Amino acid sequence: MSLSLSKRAQGVKPSSTLAITAKAKELKAKGVDVVGFGAGEPDFNTPDNINDCAIQAIREGFTKYTPASGLVELKQAVCDKFRTFNHLEYDTSQIVISNGGKHSLTNIFTAIINEGDEVIIPAPFWLSYPEIVRLAGGVPVIVNTSEEEGFKITPEKLAESCNDKTKAFILNTPSNPTGMIYTREELEALARVIVEKDIYVVADEMYEYLIYGEDEHVSIGSLGREIYERTITCSGLSKSYAMTGWRIGYTGASKEITKLMSSVQSHQTSNPNSIAQKAAIEALTGSQETMKKMVEEFAVRRDYIYSRVKNFPHAHALEPKGAFYLFVNVSEALQLSYKGKTVENTSTLADILLEDYGVAVVPCTDFGFPDYIRLSYAISKEQIGKGMDRIEKFLKELSGNGE
């Protein structure tokens, strides 16, 4: 008997961000001084009021199954947040509470994708998008943007990419990995194309609270009834509330899609963690002061890391408007020489930085832009300074081939 494994599963790429982070942690465990610009995880602790609520839930024995798609109380808190912050009207029958943002996306594409359906993904993109689409039987259609366009898809490019097989378009604002955000006017233009082509838009708004300066977050689903009906809005608590390990995400969508997502989730995972759901209610309805202070600190770090990269040789970046990433163009550094050997690509560059300089960065080939690296500034300003000193030293030691 010849046993085989799933070709679909074998086609999935491991997460390069988690691999870099694991390697950096391994070196740290051996006593190596490593600055980690890798994983997108705030260095802050979860706020005390949220932790206290979870502890109380445990002591009160709230450790049993909940409804598969989440507690009604938490769904109502999500509806209230959607209404006040996102200007979106959903009721509890349109909400699914999931085990984090990735789980929400898995639910969505399982619910809407038929084998061979295409999903438009602007590049640069969060590296999990294409893999989640493929696992659902869909076909990722990568549409390149440019630095000159602010790494944002234009309505013309979106329209040109649509065909009879197109089922959905993924919109991520603020963006991982670029930190760019779409303006209201840009979203209105995209919404007209989405309505005209009659496709879904999966609006990943995980970093919605992390906006700096005078810019605002706008949810595309809030721009009118026609676009609202085609929008599946995704968010969660991981980034804004420093709750990455709690694994709570949520979606707002039509009742039809929500019913399918709920059914899928009921069979695949049952309910989200009961204790984390209680904590999530407190996160959304309790004091927001700690979260606001975190955003203020991210803004300080953003300003600092951007000021540093502006003075680097062989590298440059656009100023991020949101999230907590700096997307750095290192194309000038590639093909230069380091210790007599060519820096062939960003994976080579990342290996040198980690092994010789104790700095973990994410090469962005898996994000669709192989000449870029991503730096997360969700670490202390002191650590950012130390890491940027090391990267600058490395870049200054590069020489032209033949020198």
Image: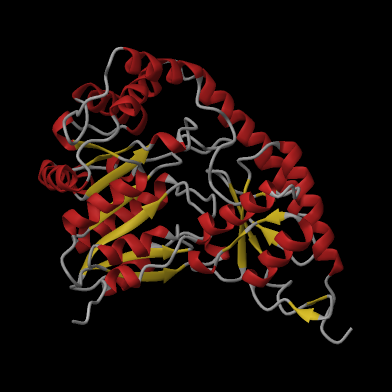
Identify whether 203 is placed above or below 361: above
Relative side of 168 to 301, left or right: left
Relative image position of residue 190 (x, y in whole percent): 34, 56
Relative side of 262 to 284, left or right: left
Looking at the rendering, which quadrant does residue 54 occupy? top left
How many badges with numbers are in the image?
0
Measuring 61% from the left and 35% from the top, which residue is drawn there?
A: 298
Looking at the rendering, which quadrant does residue 269 occupy? top left
Q: Is residue 237 visible?
A: no
Measuring 36% from the left and 13% from the top, which residue is drawn there?
A: 56
- Say how the picture is coloured: secondary structure
Relative image position of residue 204 (x, y in whole percent): 36, 48
Looking at the rendering, which quadrant does residue 254 occupy? top left
Relative side of 152 to 116, left or right: right
Relative side of 13 to 307, left or right: left
Measuring 69% from the left and 68% from the top, which residue is drawn there?
A: 349
Instruction: Please identify the residue farthest to the front as the structure is shown.
Output: 1
Relative image position of residue 138 (x, y in whole percent): 24, 67
Instruction: Please identify the residue farthest to the bottom as the structure is shown.
Output: 402
Identify whether 116 is placed above or below 381: below
Screen quadrant of the N terminus: bottom left
Relative image position of residue 9 (x, y in whole percent): 31, 68
Q: Is residue 227 visible?
A: yes
Identify whether 319 is placed above or below 160: above
Screen quadrant of the C terminus: bottom right
